[in-house]
Image (tube, rainbow, N blue to C red):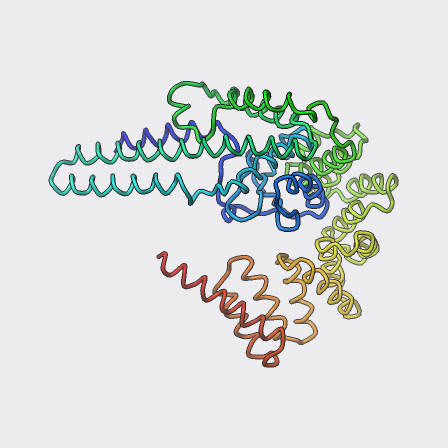
Amino acid sequence: MRALTRLAARCTAALAALALVAQPAAAQSVLRDAETEALLKDMARPLIAASGLDPKNVDIVLVNDSSVNAFVAGGQAVYIHSGLINEASSAEEVQGVIAHELGHITGGHVISDGGSKAATGVSILSLLLGAAAAAAGAGEAAMGVVMAGQQVALGKYLAFSRGQEEAADAAGAQYLSKAGMSGRGSIAFFNKLRGMERRRGFVRNADTEFYSTHPMTGDRIANLTDMYTKDPAWSRPSDPALETRFQRAKAKLFGYLAEPKSTLQVYPEGDTSVPARYARAYAFHKEALLDKAMAETDALLAKAPTDPYFLELKGQILLEAGKPADALPPLRKATELSGNQPLIATTFGHALIATESSANLPEAERVLKTAVGRDRENPFAWYQLGMVYGQRGDIPRARLASAEQQVMQLQYGSALQSAEAAEAGLPTGSPDWLRAQDIAMQARAAIERQRKRR
């Protein structure tokens, strides 16, 4: 037993020193922000086109996780950790990561295929042999067989994973080149990863090379540098407008997630730049310092009075400070200027409901129905819309909105109950009645899958 524990510890230590390790998206929470999502789409669009995929079908998803990581998990979605955005110094660096992850998508690299199937087969076989040896009374022999089999399985999987990483590196370099983007950002980010490895005490030796899911960072830098420096785009400057937007979004994310004390250390009050004011507005808001948060927000709006994201920020702070009526003008304007952007519109709808004025319910319903019509994967918008229906006495549609929200949050039992209740009260054959049936079927299927796993 102690030998098996040591093996696990060695594996964990080696993997912890490396970034960009695939993880299941369902285990982590997703961060949604209109400005950041628009930026990531614009950063990724030329790379997606260069990869031969359709930008309309590829999602760039921001995950609330402080580790420096990005991954794919099947389908056409790239998941980027908030910690990676925080560590990156430029949009170019993040674009290098996106290009690499697109290489995984186009290469069909998911944990459940190829190498992992071979590894699992060896692993299961070794466990069966070990059980047979144990049944014959050879306990030590059983453990030896299991350990040997696990080592072979791990070796097969890691070799396969390293092959995938090398292929994704090459594909990413190709997509950057085709999009006319320099690979400087990719090299810069890999150098950051190497620096992180050194700070964590990572030492290259036979063990770490064996247990690593990725090629050694130094080798990757050497290979990629050779490819990138030969490309005509190597010396091409990055898009200054995109870089400006990146610094804004990075500061906004930091201010939203970090402790206020940390935010004020990174963005001290003497810094009057847009990113610094953005970050401090969130820091002061989290400390319930409304006057200071408003001062930073008003300073931003003085520079750009029609910026929908600054207006959204002001409305959000006022709403969360218990002043929904005061939040309505900036949020209404932000919604209009952004072309009814669904996330901004959802906050506006929330503020309308929070005024507790029945006169605002028709506008709230209109705004929220438009929001979910353009972005159905928005559980908070469905929740707010359900509140509108409930206050109007339209209980079947309130139940349907709850079902929409619950099925997205994987609350299948509640979603089934809500959908069945909605179906019972809606006109037979109507679009809403059919939607309630669809959700009920989806929830039943998910519940059955969970039951079979148990």
| Foreground of the two, 328 or 210 | 210
Say which quadrant the C terminus sits in: bottom left
Q: Is residue 41 left or right of residue 194?
A: right
Q: Which residue is painted at 56% across and 22% down in the image? A: 221
Q: Is residue 407 above or below residue 359?
A: above
Q: Residue furthest bottom?
A: 428
| Foreground of the two, 59 or 383 | 59
Q: Position of residue 440 (x, y in %)?
A: 51, 69
Q: Is residue 350 above or below residue 263?
A: below
Q: Which residue is painted at 21% across and 32% down in the image? A: 144
Q: Position of residue 202 (x, y in %)?
A: 47, 21
Q: How many marks?
A: 0
| Foreground of the two, 351 or 433 | 433
Q: Which residue is painted at 75% across and 65% down in the image? A: 364
- Quadrant in the picture for residue 93: top right
- Quadrant in the picture for residue 382: bottom right
Q: Is residue 136 left or right of residue 143?
A: left
